[in-house]
Image (tube, coloured by chain):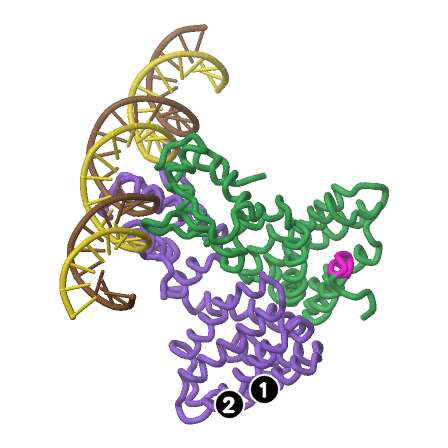
Chain colours: A green, B purple, C brown, D yellow
Amino acid sequence: MSTTGRGLHGHVLETLGPAITAGEYPPGSVLRTDELAQQFDCSRSVMREAVRVLESMHLVESRRRVGVTVRPKSEWNVYDPQVIRWRLAGADRPHQLRSLTVLRSAVEPVAAGLAAQHATAQQCAELTECALGMVAHSRGHQLEGYLFHDVAFHRVILNASGNEMFARLGDVVAEVLAGRTHHEVMFEDPDPAAVTLHVQVAEAVRARDAARAEHLVREITVGALQELDILAPGK
Amino acid sequence: MSTTGRGLHGHVLETLGPAITAGEYPPGSVLRTDELAQQFDCSRSVMREAVRVLESMHLVESRRRVGVTVRPKSEWNVYDPQVIRWRLAGADRPHQLRSLTVLRSAVEPVAAGLAAQHATAQQCAELTECALGMVAHSRGHQLEGYLFHDVAFHRVILNASGNEMFARLGDVVAEVLAGRTHHEVMFEDPDPAAVTLHVQVAEAVRARDAARAEHLVREITVGALQELDILAPGK
DNA sequence: CGGGAACAAAAAGTCAGACTTATTTGTCAC
DNA sequence: GTGACAAATAAGTCTGACTTTTTGTTCCCG
């Protein structure tokens, strides 16, 4: 599941990163490379490489004669998949999940509109297939199967949009959907209305009806917002 | 302007990073740490740290007995501010600018709607101030002054949305707007209609009219899309 | 008593070289 | 051909010495 973790360097990252994003070291905290190397029982070279990566994520800043200082949350590269994963695994998981769901609600409808314009025949077919898969797994506690097709569905939409920035949000959406199924509100069976909407989206894209695709996906994301009580149920 | 660049390690990154994002090394290309260290006239340690950072950006993958292989563009962390900057400085600047403008068109309207709900009194004041600044610099070749207030305006909107993911797109928007003013279509004076829209957005946010704020910003972003011929002028 | 210049200390930055480990590739026997 | 074994290769790791920058202190002079 985790992309990093290979090698000693990866192990250090997978420990320090989550610790920082979890707020264990408050902003302004100063770490010393030598001390950290001792704590993690590794050489300074390995520690330096790890710090470099954390620095590229804007989690910390390394300055001579000062040390490695932890930066405030507002400066973190919150779009870095690794940072997202660390935060989802930590204490502010709910908060992160909300932020990402709001992001989804902004991006996915527009992506769907573009997908309706640019999707290839194969992508249309995949979309229909995913929607049918969702229908097939929508009843009788087949949550894992449903999730699988749901994730695939949204990935196809994002990819078919033809926009590379949208396409790279596929992993984020996957995390959010998985999080919802595994940790958050988990209905016995998915909302039938949502399932229907997905099928209709597939139809709209196939019919090249951009406005309708966008509108339908907006309804789906509104549902996701309501599940997290971000949006009032009415209107 | 550039956050990195400090130290030998930063210099290597600022050379290798742009080279990779510019496509100088096609996907699958294999680099050897030793050779690179020789090329850049630095030690292996410095080179390794640079490679680690590039790896965390998913630009390359380092494997034993193989070397450092360049990953396909589709796997890059395209939301990394550094990657964005490198790409904007390179050959596919137009393409990147289009991708980012489409992203803006998805995110900013939603952010504006949220800003209308959550903006503090001070943020409302700042917004009005920015809008007035835009008006003041909208005539007579005061493009730099106009740009300054335009960037500030959109930053306030994104910050006031209360969503950390939106807030962190402030730098991206700044880059896009600056790019438009400095390199792309550059009108003698900004479109008066756009200026008016910004003023109206400030009013809508102040009036807590989320739907109106969202609609108005959507019109602004539609204008931005049309400037880049992404959207047909009609509709 | 205050301000500035010289100095000392601290921590990151850099380097060189030796050694380890994983992975691939090639070879040989079965 | 297939399997196991051996060799080659490049990244990974460690160590220790040295450099550079920044900061805080001290001390002298105005």
Q: In the rendered image, which quarter is residue B110 located in? A: bottom right
Read off the magenta span.
A223-229
Q: Identify the subunit bearing mark 2.
A: B
Is residue B72 visible in the rendered image? The answer is: no
Q: Residue at x 66, y 55 (%)?
A: A95
In the image, A53: left or right of B157?
Answer: left
Quadrant occupied by the C terminus of chain A: bottom right
- Is A34 situated above or below A232? above
Give B91 or B208, whichever is nearer the viewer. B208
- Is A152 situated above or below B81? above
The question of residue A214 being in magenta is answered with: no
* Element at label 2: helix
For label 1, count other residues whose C-alpha is less than 10 Å away and answer few (under 14), some (14-19) or many (20+): many
Q: Residue at x 71, y 80 (%)?
A: B209
Q: Which amino acid is tagged 1?
A: Val
Name the residue tied to disc 1.
B199
Residue A165 position, x and y percent, is 54, 60
- The disc at residue B135 is 2
Contact between labelled residues 2 and 1, with CB atoms less than 8 Å apart: yes
